[in-house]
Image (cartoon, helix red, strand yellow):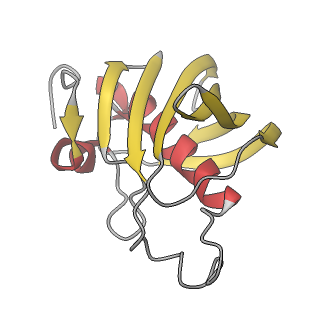
């Protein structure tokens, strides 16, 4: 993809032109807001047939916290990789700080994922990310990423 960043809203077809992730590991369905290099808002419909629920947990389906974090990281990667100078590159997840889980995420929930890029120095950057279900905070954390050259 060349030229300017895509205009939100857009779905998986456009997300796949920005991110290298593919099913079943692409964890965002739609980008509703995008300011390349600065801020992004995405959405994930948590479905009863998502691949992790048969094992986590059979009697009490709960979206694993690590996958909520991964969804936040993929959301942040859209903001970073939508920038023209980063097109076609991979943003590697380098860490998370101050991560907290505040609410269980279960089938039928709609996750609203937000990431605000806080600082970028060369290929390394940080972003503040949240995951909400409605008005309730499900998770938050500060992501560190490295854009592969």
Residue 132 drawn at (x, y percent): 57, 34
Residue 96 drawn at (x, y percent): 75, 42
Residue furthest out toward the right:
98
Q: Nearer the viewer, residue 130 or 14?
A: 130
Could you tell me which residue is drawn at 67 percent across and 59 percent down? 66
Q: Is residue 34 above or below residue 109?
A: above
Left or right of residue 109, residue 120 in this image: right
Could you tell me which residue is drawn at 56 percent across and 49 percent down? 92
Q: Is residue 125 above or below residue 133?
A: above
Could you say which quadrant of the image residue 128 lies in?
top right
Left or right of residue 110, residue 4 in this image: left
Regarding residue 27, the answer to whether it shows in the image is yes
Residue 88 drawn at (x, y percent): 30, 44
Could you tell me which residue is drawn at 32 percent across and 64 percent down? 22
Regarding residue 148, the answer to whether it shows in the image is no
Could you tell me which residue is drawn at 16 percent across and 38 percent down? 1
Q: Nearer the viewer, residue 18 or 8?
A: 8
Residue 14 drawn at (x, y percent): 18, 42
């Amino acid at each position: 993809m060349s030229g300017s960043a895509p205009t939100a809203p857009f779905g998986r077809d456009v997300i796949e032109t920005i991110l290298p992730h593919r099913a079943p590991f692409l964890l965002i369905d739609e980008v509703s807001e995008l300011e390349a290099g600065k801020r992004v808002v995405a959405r994930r419909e948590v479905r009863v047939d998502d691949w992790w629920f048969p094992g986590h947990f059979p009697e009490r389906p709960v979206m694993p916290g690590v996958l909520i974090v991964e969804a936040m990281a993929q959301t942040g990667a859209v903001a970073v990789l939508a920038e023209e100078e980063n097109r076609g590159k991979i943003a590697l997840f380098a860490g998370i700080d101050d991560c907290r889980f505040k609410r269980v995420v279960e089938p039928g929930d709609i996750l609203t994922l937000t990431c605000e890029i806080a600082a970028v120095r060369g290929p390394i950057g940080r972003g503040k990310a949240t995951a909400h279900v409605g008005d309730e905070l499900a998770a938050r954390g500060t992501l560190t990423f490295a854009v592969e050259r």
